[in-house]
Amino acid sequence: MLISVKNLCKEYDNEGIVTRALCGVTFDIADGEFVSIMGPSGSGKSTLMQLLGFLDRPTDGEYFFQGKDTKNFSDDDLAFLRNQKIGFVFQSFNLLPRTTVFENVELPLLYDERKESRGLLNRKVHDALRSVNLENRISNFSNQLSGGEQQRVAIARALVNDPALILADEPTGNLDSKNGLQIMRILQRLNNDGHTIVMVTHETYTSEHAKRIIQMLDGKVENDYLVKKRRIADGEEELLK
Ligand SMILES: Nc1ncnc2c1ncn2[C@@H]1O[C@H](COP(=O)(O)OP(=O)(O)OP(=O)(O)O)[C@@H](O)[C@H]1O
Ligand SMILES: [Mg+2]
């Protein structure tokens, strides 16, 4: 099992004001799944993504990643997992401005202590950009790109280390429907190639591109089910299967 969480809880304590963002969350995610996390604003979706991506630690409960209990992992262990095993895609793209597409995608590779050869790094960046069809923009500055293109660069950056898990928090939230569909097409293709994807969205329509939907309410899992008629983003079209 790639992910196994049991009774996961997260409370934020800001100067004595405690907010319970997640409580008693339990589920498994296997390698190769494509899961949408749905739920109203404030239901704990982003908090859950931050815990799954080791950006934050739970206040209670268990998190097994690739079979290992993460409870006693050091901050360095978690930083290593974040860099090597997780690719993040955010609603707001989070690219470095005045920096080229190449440099943005290369960034996660530079944290790797193995010090791979220049040639290998170049090839990984090119491969990642090819998989989002943006090799031709490799020398552009990231702020010269459209929103849809910037999100594709962000996906290439998330992919470049060949992570075990891609976490995307509202990846189409800042895009129009045409660009959103293109992102769904890329995510579905990556999933077909074996990548495990967990994506937050508040749009039912977007969520139905995944294979499974976990619905959150008030910090709890309200519902967890397989998508019966999955939407397949295919070119400009969409098919129901
Ligand atoms: N750093 C923080 N400190 C205190 N409370 C927080 C913090 N981050 C989130 N919360 C609270 O935790 C709850 C869950 O927030 P979270 O961001 O996970 O919701 P969400 O489902 O992602 O919502 P949205 O759809 O608006 O993005 C909310 O009540 C929120 O106010
Ligand atoms: Mg959120």
Image: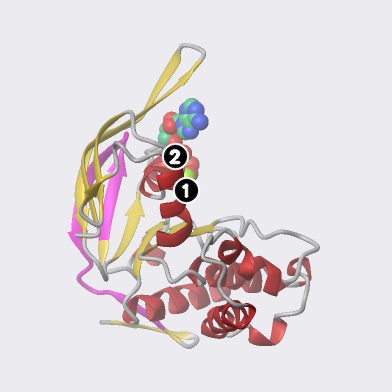
Q: Amino acid at mark 1?
A: Ala
| Residue at 37% over, 38% down | 43
Q: Secondary structure at mark 2?
A: helix
Whole-angstrom CA distance, mark 1 to mark 2, is 6 Å
Q: Secondary structure at mark 1?
A: helix
Residue 44's place in the image compared with 2, above or below, is: above
Q: Position of residue 195 (x, y in %)?
A: 35, 72
Query: Is 38 displayed left or right of 129 in the figure?
Result: left
**Would you name the residue on which mark 2 appears?**
75
Report whether residue 41 is seen.
no
Residue 211's place in the image compared with 75, above or below, is: below
Q: Which residues are magenta?
A: 213-233
Quadrant where the image shows the C terminus? bottom left
**Would you name the residue on which mark 1 appears?**
79
Q: Position of residue 181 (x, y in %)?
A: 49, 75
Residue 18's place in the image compared with 130, above or below, is: above
| Residue at 55% over, 73% down | 116
Most common SS among magenta residues: strand
Residue 191's image quarter? bottom left
Q: Amino acid at mark 2?
A: Asp
Residue 35's place in the image compared with 231, above or below, is: above
Q: Position of residue 15 (x, y in %)?
A: 51, 13
The residue carrying mark 1 has its beta carbon less than 8 Å from ligand 1:
no
Relative to the observer, which residue lies in front, 110 or 100?
110
